[in-house]
Image (cartoon, grey):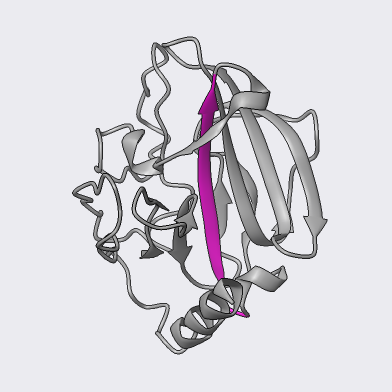
Amino acid sequence: MRVWVILAGLAALAGCGVERVGEAVRYRPEASDPINVVMPPDATFISQQFLVSRATEDRHEGIDLWGARSTPVLAAAPGVVVASWKGPLYGNRVRIDHGRDENGLRIFTRYFHLESRSVQVGDRVARGAGIGRMGATGLLAGGGVHLHFEVWRGAREGDLVPVDPHLFWANGIGQVTCFDPGVDYADDRFVTIYPTACGG
């Protein structure tokens, strides 16, 4: 039943213009640890926040970025592509291994519903490198063009858990950070840039 509710919500959002930029919806009331999110004025709209609730069984293990079809999707941090394939639920998807963070934990990012993928397993990608284009592939996209973006972390690959992506922006917690090729990002800790190109 929950899947149909999600699909209905996505279908409703499809009527919202993709011209919305620089905005993010609020966390749902049952969210355990909401973060104050600050958006750059030209960043694609966040239509759904991270949710792993202690009060309910509801889960949304990443954030949804709503934008125009074919918007470039970027690697949020440097790493190695460990999955690049198409499946029935999430469509075209990419998974990047970023090695270990400053606490020695394994860390991965995942990108779902891509229109197209431009990387293959084994490719080493730089922060901000194009890995695909925003689309609406997979049943759970509900026909709405968006990127579902996740961050997973754990001691070993088998122990990974989803973590709120807003914890890792290069400009600080909740400070959504658009990619700037002229910036020398920190290498001593795991930080990310927004995984869609800002400003169209």
Magenta stretch bounds: 143-154
* Residue displayed at 56% across by 39% down: 75
Relative horizontal placement of residue 113, taking residue 103 as reference (left or right): right
> Going 52% across and 50% down the picture, which residue do you hit?
149
Which quadrant is the N terminus positioned in? bottom right
Rendered image quadrant of residue 169: top left
The one nearer the camera, 162 or 41, is 162
Q: Is residue 52 above or below residue 78?
A: below
Reply yes or no: does residue 109 show up in magenta.
Answer: no
User: Is residue 110 or residue 17 the one in the foreground?
Assistant: 110
- Report whether 95 appears left or right of 46: right
Location of residue 133 with respect to 187 vertically, above or below: below
Q: Position of residue 170 (x, y in %)?
A: 32, 32
Residue 181: x and y in percent read 43, 35
Residue 79: quadrant of the picture: top right
- Please give the name of the residue rendered at 61% of the width and 67% of the height, measured from the top-left corner: 70
**Main structural element of the magenta stretch: helix, strand or loop?**
strand
Question: Height in image: 132 above or below 33?
Answer: below
